[in-house]
Amino acid sequence: MVRVQAIMGIIRDCDLEKMEDANFMQVMIERTVKLMDLTLLKTVSHKFTPQGLTTVALLSESHIAIDTYPEEKLMLVDVISCGQKDAKIVLDIMEDMLGGITEIIFDKMIEGN
Amino acid sequence: MVRVQAIMGIIRDCDLEKMEDANFMQVMIERTVKLMDLTLLKTVSHKFTPQGLTTVALLSESHIAIDTYPEEKLMLVDVISCGQKDAKIVLDIMEDMLGGITEIIFDKMIEGN
């Protein structure tokens, strides 16, 4: 039976420079994936003009998506995971690396039929 | 102020052949994006062995992610949108194109500071 954790959070008051740095985001995703015992398949990102960055990591266990809103120093993190560990860890790591404050807006275990 | 709709749904009893078809998913995303008046930046997908497909569309207005679970004939659709139209439309279009039944598991308007 499918068993997937869907968690979404806002991280406020993030470091602006890091939020705009696609390489930093890549490193952050790699660290997160490693600590969560997940498998990274590929990462895709898009840098907006004049600011903003969307980064999505495709995983063997689903995906992590990050949308940044530098104008308000916040980012939205969306994780769907069928990994073994609590995906809340993803938000904890990102909060720590970006110096922000997380507000979980949704955390649900979704089960199949 | 950031104003983003986050909606997630399960579509059950989907057409199995379509769920496994990356080209069909691409067409479905393009149709969805057009009807929602969104702007598609790029699509990335990964086909799992023996089955399963993850497709993520990066939009100017955030993203749409689809994870399929053919073993249970269901897919999980995750939309973050700062577009003008109700993102529930995304699920309606996909439900129609895949012949499934949608269960909304989360639908929230997220506002910034």
Image (tube, coloured by chain):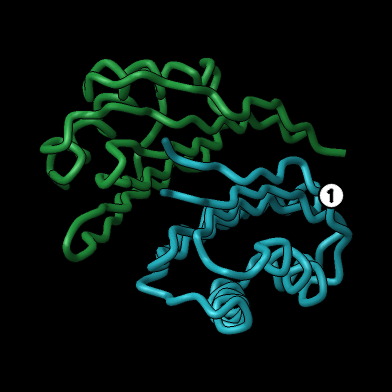
Chain colours: A cyan, B green
Using the image, determine if residue A39 lies above or below residue A62. Answer: below
- Left or right: where A35 falls relative to B40: right
Using the image, determine if residue B87 lies above or below residue A21. Answer: above
- Left or right: where B16 falls relative to A1: left
Dot 1, crowdedness within 10 Å: few (<14), some or many (≥20)? some
Q: Residue A3: x percent and y percent?
A: 50, 51
Q: Which residue is mark 1?
A: A103
Q: Quadrant of residue B49?
A: bottom left
Residue drawn where x is 47% and y is 59% of the image: A63
Q: Which one is in front, A79 or A52? A: A79
Q: Which one is in front, B72 or B80? A: B72
Q: Residue B113: x percent and y percent?
A: 88, 39
- Left or right: where B57 falls relative to B98: right
User: Quadrant of the image for the C terminus of chain A?
Assistant: top left
The kind of residue tagged 1 is: Glu
Using the image, determine if residue B58 lies above or below residue A88. Answer: above
Q: Residue B9: x percent and y percent?
A: 49, 30
Q: Quadrant of residue B5?
A: top right
Residue drawn where x is 82% and y is 75% of the image: A96
Residue drawn where x is 86% and y is 71% of the image: A99
